Amino acid sequence: MRSIWNGAISFGLVSIPIKLVNATESHSIAFRQIHTEDNGRIRYRKVCELEDREVSQAEIGKGYEDADGSIIPISDDDLSHLPIPTARTIEIVAFVPADRIDPLQMGAAYYLAAGGAPAAKPYTLLREALKRSNKVAIAKYALRGRERLGMLRVVGEAIAMHGLLWPDEVRAPEGVAPDTDVTIRDKELDLADALMDTLGEVDLEDLHDEYREALEEVIAAKTSGEAPPEAPAPATGGKVLDLMAALENSVRAARESRGVDTPAAEAEVRSLPQGRSAPKETGGKKSTKAAAKKTAPARKSTSKATAGTKKTASAKSTSKSTAKSAATTKKTAAKKTVSRKRSA
């Protein structure tokens, strides 16, 4: 790996010579701009406005444009003599827990390579100190014409540095979150948790750039004169009208894709049909009254039959017996009424 910056880490009074190298690389496929009529390359040429001629890279320097339009030349020698300690030094200013760093601040990543044998021991000392403290180092450094903020941490047996944005360069998330009041039910959270558990974890080494692979297939087909592969039909999904149903379907689909058996008694939320009301719960007293109401017609029919028999007998008997039987019937009915009230 080619170094892009040489300097030193300032660790108190300890100075560690280092080389800065890029820790990441891009594998994206680059395209050239062409003239569509004849496939000719479109190039950008660097032309001096005063001489109206193309200049080489060796003739190009830096300059600052003043308010009146005049150009003030700034050389690399001017930048190397800036009156700041971070011109060629990564100056560690503090050690903090890693969770104190907002991921929004993190930018480009670099590896810090020890600059020769004399730097091996202080480099290892800083690395082991970071390991044992479980902290990261916050540092200042100058790169590409400006002072920057960085975070040093241990990666394997090396020290890596992440460029950080200054706190005032991170925008506040105002107006981003929904301003509508939304109520989330526990059942919806439970299904969201179930979906997260079903999807589980993933080894980042297993993830790859499918877009780049598809693009390589198209380029290979065009190179060999074949027709490019057809794109798969997009999934036809309706609008999500029911969040609960969408969550349930997502959990079911995730389990099927991962070969996980869906529980037989999987909880589902179903709405009741319109026009029907949910059955009411029956308590002990209500059921007793209902039973009493059901048995009431039977008792009434029995008393009617008995009354009919007594009427037949009274027709054959004398008026005295009729009066006595009527009185007896009233007393019996009264007793039955009392017994019914007690049983109820």
Image (cartoon, rainbow, N blue to C red):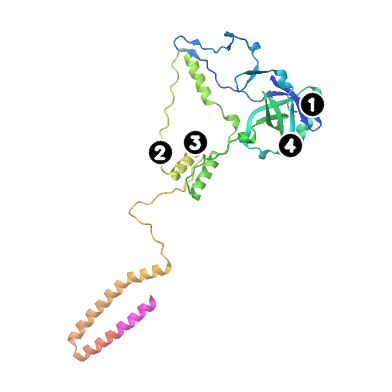
Mark 1 / mark 3, whichever is N-terminal: 1
Magenta portion: prevailing SS class = helix
Q: What residue do we see at 52% from left, 22% from top?
A: 213
Sort mark 1 into few (<14), some (14-19) or many (20+) by Cα contacts within 10 Å: some
Measure the alpha-carbon separation of dots 4 and 1.
Answer: 22 Å
Residue under pointer 4: 94
Q: Nearer the viewer, residue 310 or 116?
A: 116
Question: With 26 as the anchor, is 77 left or right in this view?
Answer: right
In contact (CB < 8 Å): disc 4 and disc 1 = no
Q: Which SS class for mark 2?
A: loop
Q: How many marks?
A: 4
Residue under pointer 3: 257
Residue under pointer 2: 239
Amino acid type at mark 3: Ser
Q: Position of residue 317 (x, y in %)?
A: 19, 88
Q: Position of residue 30 (x, y in %)?
A: 54, 18
Which circle, 4 or 1, is nearer the viewer?
4
Which circle, 4 or 2, is nearer the viewer?
4
Residue under pointer 1: 120
Q: Which SS class for mark 3?
A: helix
Amino acid type at mark 2: Lys
Residue 336 magenta: yes
Measure the alpha-carbon separation of dots 4 and 2.
Answer: 51 Å
Amino acid type at mark 1: Ala
Measure the alpha-carbon separation of dots 4 and 3.
Answer: 47 Å
Q: Which residues are magenta?
A: 331-344
